[in-house]
Amino acid sequence: MVPIPYYLLLAAALFCMGMFGVMVRRNALVVFMCVELMLNAANLTFLAFARMHGDVIGHVSAFFVIAVAASEAAIGLAIVIAVFRSRGSVLVEDLRTMKH
Amino acid sequence: MNIELILFGAFALLTLLSAGTVIFARSPINSAMALVSTFFFLAGLYVLLWAHTVAILQVMVYAGAIMVLFLFVIMLLNLGESPTRGKPTLARIVGGAATVGLLVVLGIVLLKLPGGAPPTMSAAAQASFGTMATLGQTIFTQWLLPFEAVSLLLLVAMVGAVVVAKSRI
């Protein structure tokens, strides 16, 4: 039996790695991949708590998170394609129209 | 030593290694492939947590569908390796430091949780926990409205993706 806090610590580490990638990487596609890492960390937390309480609601939450991640990936990648078509770049530093 | 603990350690280590590869790989293709392996190792962790259905969904939806979409977009845009490393601007340094701080705070909080092994279930509860039948029964009785809302969300996302990505309609 693995203690539940081990899973939670792993999920926290995974979340922080995803957040680090979102902060540091320049390529918008890699930023999206790091968002997926963060969503997976949330899933791992849900499942660990579901196992801890013996309740299947955590699995339902993970299912919904996967569905939301799928729609997020579809919309996000469509936006990346549209931006690449109009600007010719997917680096987030080049997209500063709304900054000024 | 417990076999479950050994499996957990192996999967956890491999997950963190491939997640690190996702972040630090030069080319987006390498990041995507590392992300696929991250999802596979996470599915192994989900099986250790008795979430078989979610593990199957993880492999089919994440490692299958979503990553194919990512790879398709990367190849469509024909991105090479990033020419230069980004300069460490102030915002990135502050962001990295904030992430490390968050990790430390989360670790301190989680270590204060009541530890020990998860509670044992009865044999009947253990046999049905996390199976497709149990999950389906829960979704279609208590969570029917959110389930339908999610199907609507997927439809809207699909239409929206086509509208945004298509140049001329």
Image (cartoon, helix red, strand yellow):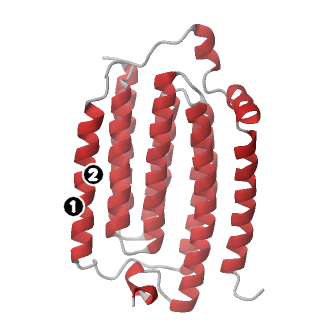
- Residue at the spot 48% in from the left edge and 48% down from the top edge: A40
Compared with B75, B13 (above or below) is above
Residue B126 placement, left or right of A15 = right
Say what amino acid the circle numbered 1 marks: Ala
Q: Is residue A53 left or right of residue A70?
A: left
Q: Is residue B44 visible?
A: no
Quarter-of-image position of residue B95: bottom left
On screen, A50 above or below A85? above
- Give the labeled residue for mark 1: B97
Q: Dividing the picture into quarters, in which one does residue B4 lie?
A: top left
On the rendered structure, is A5 left or right of B74?
left
Instruction: Pinpoint the chain carrying mark 2.
Output: B
**Residue B35 position in % (x across, y down):** 46, 55
Q: Chain for mark 1?
A: B
Q: Write the residue at 53% across / 72% down.
A: B74
Pointer 2 and pointer 1 on the same chain: yes
Query: Which sits earlier in the primary sequence, circle 2 or circle 1?
Result: 1
Q: Distance between the residues labelled 2 and 1?
A: 9 Å
A38 lies above or below B134:
below
Q: In this view, does B74 lie above or below B56?
A: below
**Disc 1 residue crowd, few under 14, some 14–19, many 20+, Cα 10 Å:** few
Residue at disc 2, secondary structure: helix
Q: Position of residue B87 (x, y in %)?
A: 24, 79
Q: What element carries label 1?
A: helix
Estimate the x, y position of residue B85 in percent, counting from the top left.
27, 77
Task: Tell me the tag on residue B102.
Answer: 2
Res B57 quadrant in image: top right
Q: Residue A43 carries which label?
A: none
Amino acid at circle 2: Leu
